[in-house]
């Protein structure tokens, strides 16, 4: 029975390239897949595109391609990435530029998938009767319609499969579901039917879900016996050995650090899962309730038992909209009475905000070192035992100038507030906030605009 080896190259925009290079060199993989995107990343890339229409893709695609294109050519492996972000065509041009700069890569085929950017089509969607109401609480789209700055559909694996069918060595996409990056090679290699083989597709999506956060399944960010994980400085990103019948083994490259065990795989298995019996993706509805994990050797875990149901008839669309401004300042107080000093400073700031008539929709105070991570969930340590505490005050407002005025209240506290103020980390310039709006759009409407284009390095 055929087996395909797929490596994870990236878990987010800015992830280390070193494990991907190691996997490409010594992991004996057929495919290396890079997940660069999250909702936050889309917001960052949208701001890049607003500053420069030529940008809007993950800028580390330049270094990634510079390191890996020679290995793609030499070893015959294929790269799949959603680093195209808000501008897949821009990412294509940058990849072509790097390929020409490197030289000797003639014949490599680069594919780009477009059609996830639906911002220009929102009006036509509503004209066709799509409500675009918020998928979780049913809010009317009219509440944010005039403030939308980007809108992207979560595409599935099919356009990536089409790119591979056309012989692509590198596939660049915009927003696709994370798991689709990893599922597509299996559909292409094994000929799985995208509208029938729900059990096989479920195993493929499960594999993608385990791989999408790179080192998080191979010992990174492990909340179990994390002290026993060896050589995190040399962590190996996960590799999946997938059989034609969908069963697969999670592992990593020989000689790398980290750990692949039932415990690390189980932790990633439950990551971002709301309903284990019905995990919705564009390619299949995944049921995790009968999944079996088994240690079958050092850093080798067998994964079986995923089941699936027919894919949804809608695509999820995520939009970003302008949602006010953030003002923030952070500074510290030292022992004795560090917490009491910080609380008094907070009281002073709030009184001055009131006296100046500043209107903020929200004022948030955190005492870093006391409650900024766990909030009220856990009991707080005795305040008198803290050697130092940092005070963070943040405000949210619809007015940029009002957000900036928070910072002007803080420096005077150095001489006119509680004693031992120190480590003033500065006042953040007002930062525009983006809210997220999620809705569902019929699949056939989105699919009309999906395009796959393949070019060849000459």
Image (cartoon, rainbow, N blue to C red):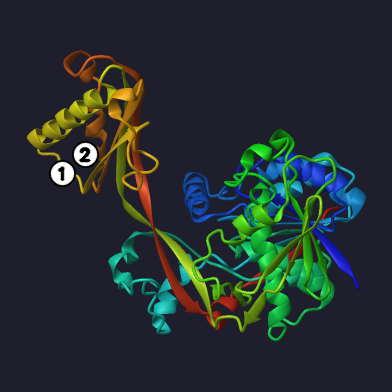
Q: Who is closer to the viewer here, 154 or 119?
A: 154
Image location (x, y in percent) of residue 82:
64, 57
Callout 2 crowding tier (Cα within 10 Å): few <14, some 14–19, many ≥20: some
Quarter of image, res 454: bottom right
As drawn, the residue found furthest toward the bottom would be 196
Q: Please say whether residue 452 is visible from this viewpoint.
A: no
Q: Nearer the viewer, residue 113 or 29?
A: 29
Give the mark, 2 or 1, whose residue is nearer the N terminus.
1
Question: Label 1: which residue?
Answer: 359
Q: Residues within 10 Å of mark 1 (few under 14, many from 20)?
A: some
Question: Residue drawn at (26%, 29%), measured in percent from left and top?
Answer: 407
Q: Position of residue 321 (x, y in %)?
A: 37, 58
Q: Nearer the viewer, residue 116 or 219?
A: 219
Locate residue 64, reporting x and y percent. Answer: 72, 44
Query: Would residue 82 be found to the left or right of residue 297 on screen?
Result: left
- Front-lying residue, 272 or 7: 272
- Image height check: is 392 above or below 385? below
* Local SS, label 2: helix
Q: Is residue 198 visible?
A: yes
Q: Is residue 337 above or below residue 403?
A: above
Q: Quadrant of residue 179?
A: bottom right
Instruction: Find numbered disc 1 in the image and state the secondary structure of the residue it sits on.
Output: loop
Find out whether the residues at labels 2 and 1 contact each other: C-beta distance under 8 Å: yes
Q: Which residue is mark 2?
A: 402
């Amino acid at each position: 029975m055929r087996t395909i080896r797929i490596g994870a190259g990236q878990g987010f925009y800015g992830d280390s390239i070193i494990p991907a290079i190691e996997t490409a060199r010594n992991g004996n993989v057929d495919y290396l897949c890079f997940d660069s995107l999250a909702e936050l990343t889309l917001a960052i890339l949208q701001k890049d595109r607003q500053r420069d229409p030529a940008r809007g893709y993950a800028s580390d695609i330049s270094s990634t391609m510079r390191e890996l294109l020679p290995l793609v050519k030499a070893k015959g492996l294929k790269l799949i990435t959603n680093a195209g972000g808000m501008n897949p065509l821009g990412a294509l041009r940058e990849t072509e530029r790097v390929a020409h700069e490197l030289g000797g890569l003639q014949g490599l085929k680069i594919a780009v998938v477009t059609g996830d950017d639906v911002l220009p089509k929102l009006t036509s969607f509503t004209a066709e009767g799509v409500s675009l109401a918020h998928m979780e609480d049913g809010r009317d789209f009219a509440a944010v319609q005039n403030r939308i700055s980007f809108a992207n559909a979560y595409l599935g694996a099919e356009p990536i499969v089409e790119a591979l069918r056309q012989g692509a060595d590198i596939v660049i996409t915009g927003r696709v579901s994370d798991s689709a990056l990893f599922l597509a090679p299996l559909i292409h290699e094994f000929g799985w039917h995208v509208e029938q083989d729900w059990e096989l597709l479920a195993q493929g999506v499960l594999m993608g879900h385990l791989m999408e956060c790179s080192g998080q399944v191979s010992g990174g960010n492990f909340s179990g016996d994390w002290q026993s994980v060896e050589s995190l400085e040399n962590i190996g990103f996960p590799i999946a050995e997938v059989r034609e019948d969908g069963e697969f083994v999670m592992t990593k490259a020989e000689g790398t650090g980290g750990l692949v065990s039932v415990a690390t795989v189980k932790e990633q298995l439950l990551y971002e899962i709301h309903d284990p019996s019905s995990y919705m993706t564009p390619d299949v509805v995944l049921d995790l309730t009968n999944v079996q994990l088994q240690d079958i050797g050092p850093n080798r875990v067998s994964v079986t038992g995923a089941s699936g149901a027919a894919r949804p008839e809608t695509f999820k669309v995520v939009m970003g909209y302008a949602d006010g401004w953030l003002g923030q300042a952070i500074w510290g107080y030292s022992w004795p009475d560090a917490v009491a000093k910080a609380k008094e400073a907070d009281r002073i700031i709030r009184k001055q905000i009131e006296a100046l008539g500043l209107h903020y929709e929200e004022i948030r105070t955190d005492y870093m070192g006391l409650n900024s991570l766990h909030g009220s969930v856990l009991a707080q340590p005795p305040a008198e035992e803290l050697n130092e505490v940092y005070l963070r005050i943040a405000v949210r407002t619809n007015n940029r100038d009002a957000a900036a005025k928070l910072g002007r209240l803080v420096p005077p506290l150095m001489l006119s507030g509680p004693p031992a103020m120190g480590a003033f980390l500065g006042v953040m310039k007002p930062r525009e906030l983006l809210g997220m709006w999620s809705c569902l759009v019929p699949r056939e409407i989105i699919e009309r605009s999906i395009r796959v284009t393949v070019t060849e390095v000459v």
